[in-house]
Image (cartoon, helix red, strand yellow):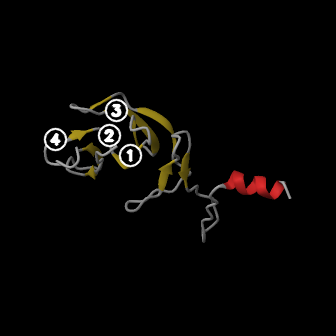
């Protein structure tokens, strides 16, 4: 989806806004109303996902077109045991929109590395066939 979804604190706290691209000054819609950050578009383009101020992952169904429209916020799960950041990209949505990649906080441990395995099932299948 070509439209942007920035965060702004013009209301006094961070909220998620939607602006059209490339004419970003032609319109603006405030999608969140109770504090939000770290927005991501679902790959389908039919949902906008973000962290709420209450430390939950939320989803808002959206309809793009001549007039942008969005539905009711749905709380997906608590982010209490997951890392967040004021800057940078700390999470993402998988291509099928069915899973999330998020860093979990493990009490008493200081993370020193993150290992990402691409094509895990293909690699596993190749090793099993040996």
Depicted 47 relative to depicted 10: above or below: above
Q: Residue furthest top?
A: 71
Residue that carries the numbered disc 3 in the rendered image: 62
User: Residue 12 shows which numbered tag?
Assistant: none
Mark sitting earlier along the chain (2/3): 2
CA distance for labels 2 and 3: 18 Å
Pick the quarter of the image with the C terminus: bottom right
113 or 94, which lies in front? 94
Between label 3 and label 1, give the one nearer the viewer.
Answer: 3
Question: Could you say which quadrant of the image residue 17 lies in?
Answer: top left
Mark sitting earlier along the chain (3/1): 1
Tell me whether the residue at label 3 lies in contact with that at label 1, contact meaning CB atoms closer than 8 angstroms.
no
74 or 92, which lies in front? 92
Residue that carries the numbered disc 4 in the rendered image: 27
Residue that carries the numbered disc 2 in the rendered image: 34
Is disc 4 surrounded by few (<14), some (14 to 19) or many (20+) residues within 10 Å?
few
Mark sitting earlier along the chain (2/4): 4
Tell me whether the residue at label 2 lies in contact with that at label 1, contact meaning CB atoms closer than 8 angstroms.
yes
Q: Residue furthest right?
A: 130
Q: Tell me the residue at 52%/42% (across/down).
A: 78
Mark 2, secondary structure of its residue: loop
Is disc 1 surrounded by few (<14), some (14 to 19) or many (20+) residues within 10 Å?
some
Mark sitting earlier along the chain (2/1): 2
Residue 92: x, y in percent? 48, 51
User: Residue 53 shows which numbered tag?
Assistant: 1
Residue 127: x, y in percent? 80, 58
């Amino acid at each position: 989806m070509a439209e942007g979804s920035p965060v702004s604190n013009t209301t006094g706290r961070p909220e998620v806004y939607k602006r059209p691209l490339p004419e970003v000054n032609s319109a603006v819609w405030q999608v969140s109303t109770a504090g939000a950050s770290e927005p991501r578009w679902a790959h389908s383009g039919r949902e906008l996902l973000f962290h709420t101020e209450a430390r939950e992952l939320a989803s808002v169904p959206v309809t793009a077109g001549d007039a942008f429209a969005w539905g009711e916020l749905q709380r997906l799960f608590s982010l209490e045991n997951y890392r967040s950041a004021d800057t940078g990209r700390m999470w993402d949505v998988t291509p099928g929109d069915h899973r999330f990649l998020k860093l979990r906080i493990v009490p008493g441990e200081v993370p020193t590395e993150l290992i990402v395995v691409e094509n895990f099932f293909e690699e596993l299948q190749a090793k099993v066939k040996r």
